Amino acid sequence: MNSKESNQPIKGLTYCIRCCTPETQEGVTFDDMGICTACRSSEEKMHIDWSEREKDLRRILDEAKEKSGANYDCILPISGGKDSFFQAHVLVNVYKMKPLAVTFSHNWFSETGFYNLQLCLEVFNLDHLQFTPARGLVNKLAKKSLGVIGDSCWHCHSGVGAFPLQVATKFKIPLLIWGESIAENDGRSSYQCQAMKFDRDYFNKVSAKLTAEEMVDSNISEKDIHPFKLPSYKEIDETGVWGLHLGDYIFWDEERQTEFIRDTYGWRETEMEGAYKGYKSAECIMAGMHDFTCYLKRGFGRATWQASVDVRNGLISRKEGFALVKKHDQERPGALDYYMSITGFSEEEFYKYINDKKLNEISDLEIPVRQRDHINAEKTVPFVQQIIEKHLWKPDPRTLTKK
């Protein structure tokens, strides 16, 4: 059966015969029938004895509580997004853990994301550490990031890995607990054969691609990137740091989990650029920008991920999925305007940089782009800046005297 069909989003790309996943997704492979890794992994998921895996998780968490003594039981890396909010519920309310919540702030929090993070801390009564890089540094790193890794988000990819590890080694809390398994929808691993497990360099391998040291240049100093440096292997070994994904131990269903935290705790969704669901990366104003760069260099964006999951779960047909992909992946996000304002790039320069990062498979293919037909409901300016602008001090005209 030919996986190149007339209704596919990018003409000339090969897609999974079952879902909407293209050959350009990192790490994906197709079997002899044309079925992608993620689809095969979703089949494995249905045959796993999750009750046995949950017993393993309970044993691990009980041991962590026993060993922690008066210290925190684990580190909970948290953004306030749907996954980390659900993680907090599982750890605190189900397993009665005492986690230290740790946040690397990308400094691009949306209003919805800011609310969700604060709600999470209040609802679950969490102690919390947060690191926020300076606005000017974020802007410099976002500018360099486009040319070196092909998206705007190196500082976030790197920081979400480095900061929790720094806290783990400094506070002697060895266990880090993440959410969704990389086997869930990614295609780079499977439940039965984990090709990539969490370790010190996990986020460098998965998303950051470059170390902090490799980002140093004439505009970015070693002092600038110091907060993004990973602890040494010696520090990791001495503390015994390791991590797990809850999704490897409990049945992961992001739709049902999102409904649960929304209806139980008041977690909020929002409109997301380049997507047809309002819960993925709701904490960040630049999520649409990240997904748009993926679309331009790989031929797929967030809507492709969402449609592929929905097709696998039997919620929509593959044809319907492709229609959603065309509608949303191809939209130019409003976040691009904010990105240009903080980097000084023109739109022509932006497209030149990203075109240089296009994969060979799509280098000669047409990648359609069109303007959005409406302004996004979520303002694409960091919420902190929105607050400052709203409350910016202005002199009271009644106190002014005429000269």
Image: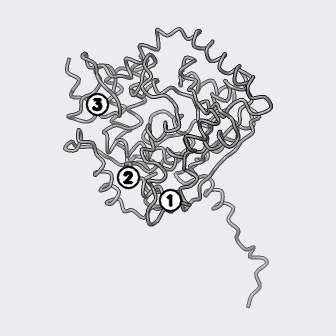
Rendered view: 262 above or below 101: above
Type of the residue with mark 1: Asn
**Image position, residue 202 (x, y; %):** 49, 36
Question: Which image quarter holds the C terminus?
Answer: bottom right
Q: Earlier in the sequence, mark 2 or mark 3?
A: 3
Q: Earlier in the sequence, mark 2 or mark 1?
A: 1
**Image position, residue 251 (x, y; %):** 55, 17
Tag in front: 2 or 1: 2
User: Quick check: 291 left or right of 165?
Assistant: left
Residue at image location 37% in from the left, 46% down from the top = 293
Label 2 to label 3, Cα distance in Å? 22 Å
The reply to whether residue 87 is in sight is yes
User: Quick check: 374 left or right of 228?
Assistant: left
Helix, strand or loop at disc 2?
Answer: helix
Type of the residue with mark 2: Val
CB atoms at circles 2 and 3 under 8 Å apart?
no
Q: Residues within 10 Å of mark 1 (few under 14, many from 20)?
A: some
| Residue 23 image label | 3
Q: Earlier in the sequence, mark 1 or mark 3?
A: 3
Question: Which image quarter holds the N terminus?
Answer: top left
Helix, strand or loop at disc 3?
Answer: loop
CB atoms at circles 2 and 1 under 8 Å apart?
no
| In the foreground, 167 or 95 | 167
Q: Residues within 10 Å of mark 3 (few under 14, many from 20)?
A: some
| Residue 148 image label | 2
**Image position, residue 190 (x, y; %):** 42, 21
Rendered view: 229 above or below 1: below
Residue at image location 45% in from the left, 34% down from the top = 276
| Residue 359 image label | none
| Residue 139 image label | 1
